[in-house]
Image: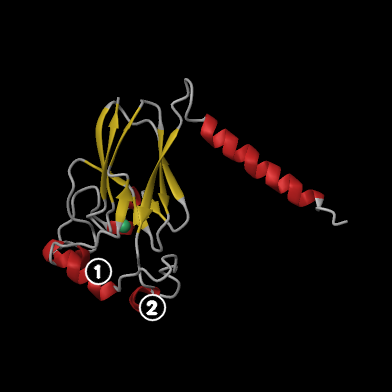
Amino acid sequence: MKRIPILSLLAGWAILAGATHAIAQGNGNSPGITQVIALDECDPVSFDAVLGPDYCKNVTLGAFTTLPVLSAGAEAGTPDPGWDFEPDQVTIKEGTVVSAVNQGGEPHTFTEVKAFGNGFVPPLNPGSATSAIPECSGGFGSVAVAKTRILQGSHLDITGLSKGKHLFQCCIHPWMRMEVDVK
Ligand SMILES: [Cu+2]
């Protein structure tokens, strides 16, 4: 007879308990959490050659875009739709936490802006524009921008959003945009 190690049973139970808890958070009177997912399809070889070793984690299982192709599309005003926030729009109750999760291969920002516009990496702006909108200007040299960063596999929780419309974009890839409406 084969014995199942007690530790693996405990681990399984902990996973089940965690899942139950996550579902319960969205019910009842608690406003809970809503997730926004950041996606990309960075190609590790061409990205790391320019941006440094291990910059792009290969999570796309073959569906990838090289850095020159990504830049060319962004510059021409036809950016790669594989770089995306999902969903594009979400309506939440006041008090709900918006958790932006980076499931892509490279860093992004989840930055609240008054109006969508250019980010701080000119080759990724339409026409390679060097001007960035105020919320993105200064890049990661600015603490205000740096603290909106979401690294691969991490998440940034936005709390305390007031009633009304809120716009979020990535300051690196300015076509990554989404809207949160708080009721
Ligand atoms: Cu981005």
Observer-nearest of 66 and 133: 66
Residue at 23%, 55% in the rendered image: 174
Quarter where residue 31 is shown = top left
Mark 2 or mark 1, earlier in chain: 2
- How many discs appear? 2
Residue at 45%, 48% in the rendered image: 155
Res 183 seen here? yes
Residue 162, image x and y in percent?
Answer: 31, 28
In the picture, measured across the screen, residue 146 lies left or right of residue 126, that is: right
Quarter where residue 129 is shown = bottom left
- Distance in Å between CA atoms under marks 2 and 1: 13 Å
Residue 16, image x and y in percent?
Answer: 64, 41
Observer-nearest of 64 and 113: 64
Relative height, residue 125 to residue 89 (above, below): below
Name the image quarter holding the N terminus. Answer: bottom right
Q: Which mark is residue 70?
A: 1
Res 146 seen here? no
The residue type indicated by label 2 comes to Val
In the picture, measured across the screen, residue 131 lies left or right of residue 68, that is: left
Q: Which residue is mark 2?
A: 45
The residue type indicated by label 1 comes to Leu
Residue at 85%, 54% in the rendered image: 3
Q: Which mark is residue 114?
A: none
Structural crowding at the residue carrying mark 1, measured as other residues with C-alpha within 10 Å and reported as few (<14), some (14–19) or many (≥20):
many
Quarter where residue 152 is shown = bottom left
Name the image quarter holding the C terminus. Answer: top left
